[in-house]
Amino acid sequence: MLATIYPYAKAFHVMAVISWMAGIFYLPRLFVYHAERGRQGGEPTKSFEIMEQKLLGMIMRPAMIATWLSGLCLVLTPGIVDWSMVWPWTKAASVLAMTWFHHWCATQKHQLSLGKSLTGRQYRMMNEVPTLLMVVIVLSVIVKF
């Protein structure tokens, strides 16, 4: 039975990861615009807050949960992961770091709504974090070092 479910779990995992990553790449970009253009208050600020809230709550959070659940299903499938190799550990560490980044984004959204934020440049720099983590994750899974 696991042999028939596994490809579906893997496909669902890939779709969930794509959705999560799309949000993780876009939300810090919204923070840049919010920090640089939203300081005047009024309509631009409200628009940024609505976009950030919907992206985080309706796309990123469910996608992160789906990624974790489907990923755990894959990991718990017997014979799929050889824990004596390095790659599952680098992937696991990177996924934990990506989850931390997701929560950091949620904290930043709250800070922006309070009128406290980093600079646009700082948000641009932080936007590189998920890219680096994605490289480590993809190399870990594909190359299996």
Image (cartoon, helix red, strand yellow):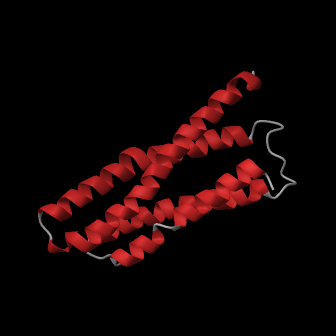
Give 18 or 102, whichever is nearer the viewer: 18
Q: Is residue 43 left or right of residue 10?
A: left
Locate residue 18, reporting x and y percent.
Answer: 51, 44
**Residue 144 image point, x, y percent:** 79, 51
Would you say 9 lies left or right of 143 here?
left
Residue drawn where x is 32% and y is 61% of the image: 30
- Please state which of residues 114 and 7 is positioned toward the viewer in this rendering: 7
Instruction: State the residue at coordinates (39%, 56%).
Output: 26
In the displayed image of the protein, which residue is found farthest to the right? 84
Vertical relation: 65 (above or below) 86: above
Q: Is residue 135 visible?
A: yes
Image quarter where the N terminus lies is top right
Question: Residue 3's spot in the image, x, y percent?
Answer: 76, 25
The C terminus is located in which quarter?
bottom right
Q: Is residue 97 above or below residue 119?
A: above
Residue 100 visible to the viewer: no
In this orientation, which residue lies closer to the viewer: 111 or 20? 20
Relative placement, left or right, of 79 versus 32 is right
Q: Is residue 140 left or right of residue 78?
A: left
Query: What residue sits 38% from the left and 59% below the top?
Result: 27
Q: Percent x, y for residue 2?
A: 75, 26
Q: Quadrant of residue 72?
A: top right
Q: How many marks?
A: 0
Residue at position x 55%, y 45% in the image: 17
